[in-house]
Image: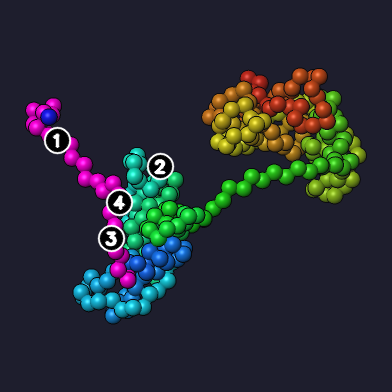
Amino acid sequence: MPSESGALVARHVLEFPGGYTRTTGPVIGRFLTELRAGRIVGVRTAEGRVLVPPLEYDPATGDAVTSEYVEVGPAGTVTACAWVHEPRPGHPLDRPFAWATIKLDGADTSLVHAVDAGNPKALSPGTRVWPVWRQDRDGQITDISHFAPEVTKIVSHVRAEYRLQAGGALGTFLEAIGRGVFIGGACATCGQVYVPFRGSCPECGTVITEQVELPDTGTITTFAINNLPDPRAPEVPFVSAYILLDGSDSPLIALVGGVPAHEVRQGMRVRAEWIPREEWTPSLANVRWFAPTGEPDVEL
């Protein structure tokens, strides 16, 4: 029949409906029999090289191989590969895979087979691979369904749940937060005011008994821009900052919101943005984040 170009073409099909039968010979027959048993063997040449798949004659010298069969692998190393983005009918896998030459451990030549690597970036020369065997084997190279890369990493879903019991100082601070108030501790010896409230002064060791109620405004002393998601953050990227509350001498770490991350700066004046009052609990979660007040920056 004429093609689109006007040339005459005809479709021909070469097929053996009953199957094409051939004898394997002792060398290939041994190789296929071992595959059926779940093993991979090569044959040793007179010069000591191990050929996989085995051949009846040494391709380097033309001499007949020895009768010594050597079990190899099962793992091997990819020496070259080509990625198949769209598998075709008759391919060993119905998903993207790679054809690769694989030098099995103990072999001196490479075997061509399919590798199921998931994506092209996961496979390159030097990648270690292992065979994935079919459950039902009948003595063909397809008894190896495919090869797969070695397991080099796993994803573990880690979750730790625990209860934290607040001590006296932290309990005092959180109880005040539950009322919408920041409580600091004033050292009677050195005059430093610490937020959160502490039981003793880290500077001089004096026991702190005096509580100081502080405003919910302060100044950013330093900050970090974060690009990993956090359920508490307003957006990504977001800013976490050390905030020096007015009247305190130690900064409090908190999120910063209401301003693009790239506009946050040292010395910026901020105020706590509280969640609705009916949702308050003895927790710092009462403060959604600190937002700019619009006041002039402070010299640190």
Q: Nearer the viewer, residue 230 or 125?
A: 125
Q: Name the element at disc 1.
A: loop
Q: Main secondary structure of the magenta part?
A: loop
Of tags 2 and 1, which is closer to the observer?
1
Displayed quadrant of residue 233: top right
Mark 4 neighbour density, 10 Å: few (under 14) some (14–19) many (20 or more)? few
Name the residue that disc number 2 marks.
Answer: 94
Of tags 4 and 1, which is closer to the observer?
4
The residues bearing labels 2 and 1 have C-alpha atoms spaced at a distance of: 30 Å
Q: In this rendering, would 47 be left or right of 123?
A: left
Give the x, y percent position of residue 10: 14, 35
**Label of residue 19 in the image:** 4
Instruction: Report the label total.
Output: 4
Q: Name the element at disc 2.
A: loop
Give the x, y percent position of residue 18: 30, 49
The residues bearing labels 3 and 1 have C-alpha atoms spaced at a distance of: 30 Å
The residues bearing labels 4 and 1 have C-alpha atoms spaced at a distance of: 24 Å
Name the residue that disc number 3 marks.
Answer: 22
